[in-house]
């Protein structure tokens, strides 16, 4: 894993052409064919400092990363953003024992629900958005549904920790000028199941900073929360090996902690999968967003 720095100049209108010209003189690779200036370099690369120095000379301010509405710079102002991300290479994916799969990698794998779960705990899926040939689809942060074919194959593979929960389906109907959701009974081959692992992992390692409303949560607090890593603007989940030994071996499990996202009010438990399940997904061209899980020795 290599930390990378991502920077982007935000310009509004044609008045900043001189800025683009000056910055591209310092870092020519930053100016793309669409007229955007973007920097994406390994952390510590000397060219990052050169670009930042030029931003300062041009009096271009950096946008606050975690801004409130009061801190956000007006859209008419020119500014730039800067982030530090994890970058994983082929060896990271080949050697990882486990992966966090927070979402699908591409909107074509989205599966839409009409909102909260019902009293029976079942997600109400929008039938028009389901793709029966897609083995795995995402319904938002850490929420996944599988097709009949996907469930059949996963069960045949014998993945340890698999769990499925039935869903309902509905369709939109125009009534008196308004669209409403009406119940829909799908054909057997168009049924989808919520992926709900039967194995729960112990709490994450302290390297994962857990916060709610920007404040650290107390030990024993299960959710909702956000996950972060010190010094990064994206997230890698971290577990102690001793903690994983308590539940291993497994192919799919869910975190003890939970978060809320994607407009849904119900808890979303991060799903962690094994290298074996990851290889199955790659072989079947399942376009998941796989993030290697970091395992640390000790507690």
Image (cartoon, helix red, strand yellow):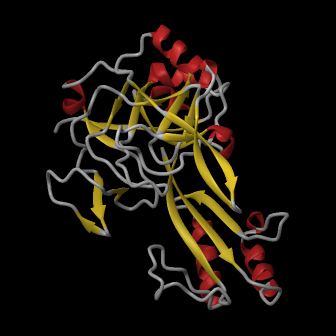
- x, y percentage for residue 102? 47, 43
Quadrant position of residue 166: top left
Give the residue displayed 67% in from the left and 32% down from the top: 131
Give the residue displayed 70% in from the left and 54% down from the top: 174
- x, y percentage for residue 256? 25, 41
The residue furthest front is: 176
Q: Is residue 69 above or below residue 88?
A: below
- Is 34 on the left or on the right of 287, as rendered? right
Q: Is residue 205 above or below residue 10?
A: above
Looking at the picture, tell me which residue is in the foreground, 163 or 73.
Answer: 163
The residue furthest top is: 156
Give the residue displayed 49% in from the left and 16% down from the top: 154
- x, y percentage for residue 71? 47, 86
- Is 93 on the left or on the right of 256, as rendered? right
Looking at the picture, tell me which residue is in the foreground, 162 or 284.
Answer: 162
- Is 264 on the left or on the right of 190, as rendered? left
- x, y percentage for residue 137? 57, 35
- Is 214 on the left or on the right of 19, as rendered? left
Which quarter of the rendering shows the C terminus? top left
Marker count (numbered):
0
Quadrant position of residue 248: top left
Looking at the picture, tell me which residue is in the foreground, 6 or 211.
Answer: 211
Quadrant position of residue 202: top left
């Amino acid at each position: 894993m290599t930390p990378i720095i991502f920077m982007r100049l935000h310009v509004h209108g044609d008045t900043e052409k001189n800025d683009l010209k000056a910055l591209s003189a310092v870092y020519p690779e930053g100016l793309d064919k669409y007229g955007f200036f973007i920097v994406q370099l390994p952390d510590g690369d000397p060219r990052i400092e050169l670009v930042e120095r030029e931003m300062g000379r041009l009096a271009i301010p950096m946008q606050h990363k975690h801004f409130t509405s009061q801190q956000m710079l007006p859209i008419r102002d020119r500014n730039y953003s800067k982030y530090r991300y994890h970058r994983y290479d082929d060896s990271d994916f080949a050697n990882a024992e486990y992966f966090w799969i927070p979402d699908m990698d591409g909107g074509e794998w989205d599966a839409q629900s009409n909102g909260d779960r019902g009293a029976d705990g079942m997600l109400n899926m929008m039938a028009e958005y389901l793709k029966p040939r897609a083995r795995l689809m995402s319904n938002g942060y850490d929420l996944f549904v599988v097709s009949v074919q996907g469930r059949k194959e996963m069960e045949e593979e014998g993945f340890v920790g698999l769990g499925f929960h039935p869903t309902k389906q509905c369709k939109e109907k125009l009534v008196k000028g308004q669209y409403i959701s009406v119940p829909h009974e799908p054909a057997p081959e168009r049924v989808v199941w919520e992926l709900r692992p039967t194995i729960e992992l112990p709490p994450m390692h302290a390297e994962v900073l857990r916060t709610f409303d920007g404040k650290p949560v107390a030990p024993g607090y299960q959710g909702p929360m956000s996950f972060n890593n010190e010094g990064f603007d994206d997230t890698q989940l971290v577990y102690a090996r001793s903690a994983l030994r308590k539940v291993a071996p497994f192919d799919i499990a869910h975190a003890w902690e939970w978060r809320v996202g994607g407009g849904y009010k119900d808890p979303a438990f991060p799903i962690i999968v094994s290298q074996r399940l990851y290889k199955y997904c790659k072989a079947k061209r399942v376009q998941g967003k796989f993030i290697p899980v970091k395992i640390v020795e000790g507690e």
